[in-house]
Image (cartoon, rainbow, N blue to C red):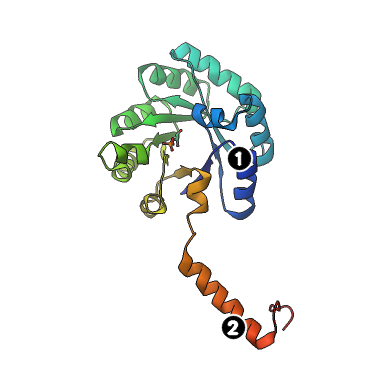
C-alpha cells in the first residue's frame, strides 16, 4: 500500500518526506484553501520538491464535464502531464473521465462514498478511486469495509484500478487497509505523525539508551564504545 500525504503545507510535506517512507501528495480544494496561497504557486512548489515522477493528485473544481476537462488540461500544463487529476465521481465526472482516459490522463476518482461510484469510475477510466473512510464512518457506515469491497470489485472484474483510501482519522483504519492490500492510502500530517506516537515505544528506546550510558558513559553511543 502506498502512503501519500494529504496536505499542501510545504513545511509539513518536507518534514514528512525527511522521516517517513512516503510516495507522493494529494490535495483537494479545501486543502489548497487551508494553505492560504495561490493554488498553482503552492502546487508548483510541491511538484518541484517531490520531483517530476512522484505522484501528485490535484482536483478539478468545474461543475460540468467540459469544464472539468479544461481544469484537468490546465493542471497537466502547470504541473506535468503525469499529474493525477482528481475528478468527482458523479454523472458529469464520469463523462469527464471517459474523455480524459481517451487522452491517456492519470485519473483519480474522488468523493467516493459508495462502491457503485468506484465501479463506474474504474470503468470510465480512473486508475484510483478514493473512498472517504472517516466521513463514511461518521455517516454510520463502515468506511474500511466499503474500501475493501471496492478493492474486491476491482479485482473480481479485472478492472485496472486501485483503491486510494482517503479521509483517515486514526492508525487502525490505515492498518486494516494495509493488511487487506489496497493500493494506496492518503492521510493528513496529523494522522501520519501519530502512526507511531506511542509511550511504550518511546519508553523502551529510552531504557536502552539509559542502560548503555550506564555502561559506557553519558552521551556515548556504539561508535564511542
Ligand atoms: C481525498 O481525496 C479527500 O480530498 C480527503 O482525503 C478528505 O479528507 P477529510 O475527510 O479529512 O477532509
Q: Is residue 77 left or right of residue 58?
A: right
Q: Residues within 10 Å of mark 1 (few under 14, many from 20)?
A: some
Callout 2: SS: helix
Is residue 64 visible from the viewing direction of this image? yes
Tell me where residue 149 appears, x and y as whole percent: 29, 41
Label 1 belongs to which residue?
54
Residue at which label 2 appears: 211
Which quadrant of the frame does ligand 1 lie within? top left
Horizontal and vertical percent position of residue 55: 57, 38
> Is residue 160 visible from the viewing direction of this image?
no
8, 4: nearer the viewer: 8
Q: Is residue 212 left or right of residue 146?
A: right
Residue, x 44% and y 14% (percent of image)? 65
The disc, 1 or 2, on the residue closer to the chain's N-terminal end is: 1
In the image as oriented, which residue stretches furthest toward the right?
224
In the image shown, does 105 or 187 lie closer to the viewer?
187
Position of residue 206 relative to residue 37, above or below, is below
Amino acid at each position: 500500500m502506498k502512503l501519500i500525504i494529504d496536505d499542501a503545507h510545504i513545511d509539513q510535506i518536507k518534514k514528512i518526506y525527511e522521516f517517513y517512507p512516503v510516495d507522493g501528495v494529494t490535495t483537494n480544494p479545501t486543502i489548497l484553501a487551508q494553505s492560504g496561497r495561490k493554488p498553482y504557486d503552492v502546487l508548483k512548489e510541491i511538484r518541484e520538491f517531490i520531483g517530476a515522477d512522484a505522484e501528485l493528485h490535484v482536483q478539478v473544481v468545474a461543475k460540468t464535464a467540459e469544464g472539468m476537462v479544461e481544469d484537468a488540461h490546465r493542471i497537466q500544463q502547470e504541473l506535468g502531464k503525469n499529474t493525477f487529476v482528481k475528478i468527482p465521481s458523479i454523472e458529469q465526472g464520469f463523462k469527464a473521465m471517459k474523455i480524459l482516459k481517451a487522452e491517456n490522463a492519470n485519473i483519480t476518482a474522488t468523493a467516493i462514498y459508495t462502491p457503485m461510484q468506484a465501479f463506474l469510475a474504474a470503468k470510465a477510466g480512473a486508475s484510483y478511486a478514493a473512498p472517504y473512510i472517516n466521513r463514511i464512518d461518521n455517516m454510520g457506515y463502515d468506511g474500511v469495509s466499503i474500501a475493501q469491497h471496492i478493492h474486491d470489485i476491482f479485482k473480481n472484474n479485472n478492472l485496472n484500478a486501485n483503491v486510494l483510501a482517503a479521509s483517515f482519522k486514526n492508525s487502525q483504519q490505515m492498518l486494516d487497509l494495509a493488511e487487506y492490500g489496497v493500493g494506496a492510502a492518503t492521510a493528513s500530517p496529523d494522522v501520519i505523525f501519530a502512526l507511531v506516537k506511542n509511550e511504550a515505544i518511546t519508553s523502551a528506546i529510552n531504557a536502552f539508551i539509559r542502560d548503555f550510558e550506564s555502561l559506557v558513559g553519558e552521551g556515548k553511543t556504539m561508535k564511542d564504545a
